[in-house]
Image (cartoon, rainbow, N blue to C red):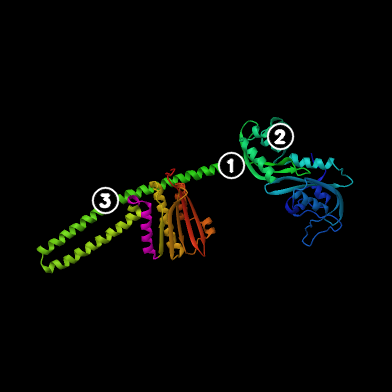
Amino acid sequence: MRSELGLILLGEEGAVLWANQVAEVLLGYSPGELQRMSLPKVGASGGKTDSGRFEQIGPVAAAFKSLQEGLQTEVEGEARFPSKDDKRVAVHWKLWAMPPSGKLKRVLMAISETAQASQDGPITSGYRDVFEYAVEGIFRSTIEGQFLEVNSALAKMYGYSSPAELMQGLSDLSTQLYVTPDRRADFVRLMLHEGSVSGFETEVYTADRKVIWIAIFARTVLGVNSEPLYFEGSVIDITERKQSEAELRESREQLRELTARIQQVREEERISVAREIHDDLGQSLTTLAIDLHWLSSRLEKSVDDEVRKPMEEKIGSMEQHIHWTLQSLRRILAALRPPLLDELGLVAASEFHLQEFAKRAALRCEWESNLVTDLPANSSTAVFRIFQEILTNIARHSKATRVKVHLGERDLHLLMKVEDNGCGIRKEKLERSKSYGLMGMVERAAAIGGELEFIGSPRSGTTVTLKVPLGRESGR
């Protein structure tokens, strides 16, 4: 059925969201032209502004404002509307507050020429057209949980052939529609306390007992004494979005598990390589140094001075090279797997690493620790690797002169806080960063159930805080 009324759907500040052909013809506009305008002004002072937009004054604008503020649900009257050619068209108008769509408050306006309009019939039929043929589900329901009115879109969404079948099949929304009855109670509580909901998400059953996700946008309609009468609003099906979100979460979790496993394998390989280097190269170099010392002691007795002196110098040079190689080997082993981490634990290994960092970076470093609880091996390794990466970033990017480290425990959590007085990392850089170092730290923390927070300021530098639950192994 086509409406004989001019229908205009209005949004915030009277912006025209949609208008039918009858309204366009009645006011003398070309197809689509009304949708670039605001609510026409009415009254004796009506007319266009210099920008071509209409000012919101007069009884229609006052009624529109009243509906937007929730003071009334429908208003009607008669007025002379300005047409496109600035002539006046006498119309009967009526406004309804429509169920909100997201955060957008909408008002439906029906207009007809006064000579052709009745007070009730045509205008009501115009509203019914919009109600019946809306793409989104629209409803009115009692506070107790019975539908008063639903449109065809809602019936189809819930798997029923008609609104009548839906209303007959569902007499108690809490137990028959909602998968979790408590969600209906949550909905009612919000509606009565806040007066509206925007995007209330819940699972519901369809007619064939399938489960779908919906989002509800609704408001509470009040009586003359401000008592709640019923709920009205719109419903959209968000099942596909929820499925996509679940698949995305599952993919992220799988990726996180894979990352954690890769890191664990890397640590195991580091330990294996460090052990082989220590056992093979370390012992070989030590044996070589002993042999050179033995050779040097034999030169004093078996070779004359002219031959012995250059040989002793060469042996001394070789011993020095072996000494330097052993030192390099120790640094490599410490980088692969700090022996203090296995022998004395996280606190000692972190403090020693900070001391070495202070020497290399020429920074003033402060250390404080009251951590007494032992962490599982995987957690200790992850915390230490994060600490190493934090110090590396400070040396590379911060331009700091001072670093302060606190390692302790609070509320059954390990708490590591590293502060520097450098240039401070910016929030937008963190949000856009594709740094493998930053991502690696975040993933390491997540793998052991921890959280990593970065706070940067040009004046106070950067503070990195790591929180990890104590007394639990990584879930990987």
Q: Are marks 2 and 1 in contact (CB under 8 Å)?
A: no
Residue that extends furthest to the bottom in the rendered view of this protein: 306
Q: Amino acid at mark 1?
A: Lys
Distance from label 2 to label 1 (Cα)? 27 Å
The mark found on residue 146 in the picture is 2
Residue appearing at x 38%, y 61% in the figure: 357
Distance from label 1 to label 3 (Cα)? 55 Å
Where is mark 3, residue-wise? Answer: 279
Distance from label 2 to label 3 (Cα)? 78 Å
Q: Amino acid at mark 3?
A: Asp
Asked if residue 345 is among those painted magenta in the image, a careful observer would answer yes
Q: Which residues are magenta?
A: 341-362
Q: Position of residue 67 (x, y in %)?
A: 77, 48
Q: Secondary structure at mark 2?
A: loop
Q: In this picture, is 266 found above or below 203? A: below
The label nearer to you, 2 versus 1, is: 2
